[in-house]
Image: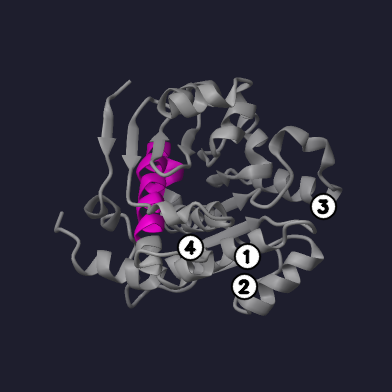
Amino acid sequence: MTGLREFRPDDAARLIAVPGEGDDKYSRGVLGVVTGSQQYPGAAVLGVEAALRTGVGMVRYLGPERPTSLVLQRRPEAVAAEGRVQAWLLGSGMPWAGRAGERDPATRERFQHALDSGRPLVLDAGALDLAASTTAPTVVTPHARELSQLLGVAVDAVRADPLAAARRAAERFDVTVLIKGSTTHVVGPAGEALVARSAPAWLATAGAGDALAGILGALVATHADEVVDDATRLAPLAAAAAVVHGLAAQRASAGGPLTVLDLCRELGPTIAQLVKYRPAD
């Protein structure tokens, strides 16, 4: 077990994959997305939007009819068909993980396909329970209440010591844990712990977690082969996603309220700034 390390913009900048002349949409990473529901279709829209604006070669969206229609209206470049995927984002905008019996057959089949693929997984909201059954490199992204439900402990205990709760979940499920909040804690299964503090208080708004999951999914997809070879790469990628998310929110807020689509619009400029001034290795 290691101590807590602050993860800064310079650290995040080193994890941005900048395409070269020889890259194509496949070499830049394909993110498979199974998110959204009839009740919460906007989660799918926000996650896909954030992933594409973070920088990924393709988003392959597979979901119910209503969110699929909304995703394609907003982002016609998304591909709503099965095919090659290098990393998966599952669960945003779906019923809470502990109620897995509520999943419809199509969602259960898509989740199982992702699990069977062996590719890296980002599990959010309604897919958090899959942490107990995955053998692929996996990062989970709960907020305090979701983490309390996953661990079977009081939510007040998680809020009192989110780092300890994240460590407990990482050890129990052998996954990387990102616990969302004004301060974001990330813990890997070996105990490595990172903290990101770039988010403004205005970011406490509906849909912010869906965008964070999309950002993280994109970063994992662009580093998927590295993650398959070394799952410890997920912790810094998760912390980098939190930093990028917070910095884009700062730009969108400018000291006042923001919407999540405002945040997504600022992802490109935020990443451009990080890349432009990132330190040499």
Measured in 3D between alpha carbons, the distance from the residue under mark 2 to the one under mark 3, in whole angstroms, is 20 Å
Q: Tell me: 132 left or right of 187.
A: right
Q: Amino acid at mark 4?
A: Gly
> Observer-nearest residue: 153 or 240?
153
Q: Secondary structure at mark 3?
A: helix
The CA distance from mark 4 to mark 1 is 11 Å
**Circle 1: element type:** strand
Label 1 to label 2: alpha-carbon separation: 6 Å
**Of all residues shown, which one is farthest toward the front?**
256
Q: Are the residues tagged 4 and 3 within 8 Å (C-beta)? A: no
Q: Earlier in the sequence, mark 2 or mark 3?
A: 2
Principal secondary structure, stretch drawn in magenta? helix
Q: Is residue 208 visible?
A: yes
Residue underneath mark 4: 29
**Which residue is identified by label 2?**
78
Taking the image as shown, residue 132 lies to the left or right of residue 52, namely right
Q: Which residues are magenta?
A: 226-247
Mark 1 / mark 2, whichever is N-terminal: 1
Amino acid type indicated by mark 1 = Arg
Please tell me whether residue 155 is drawn above or below residue 52 in the rendered image: above
- The first of marks 4 and 1 along the sequence is 4
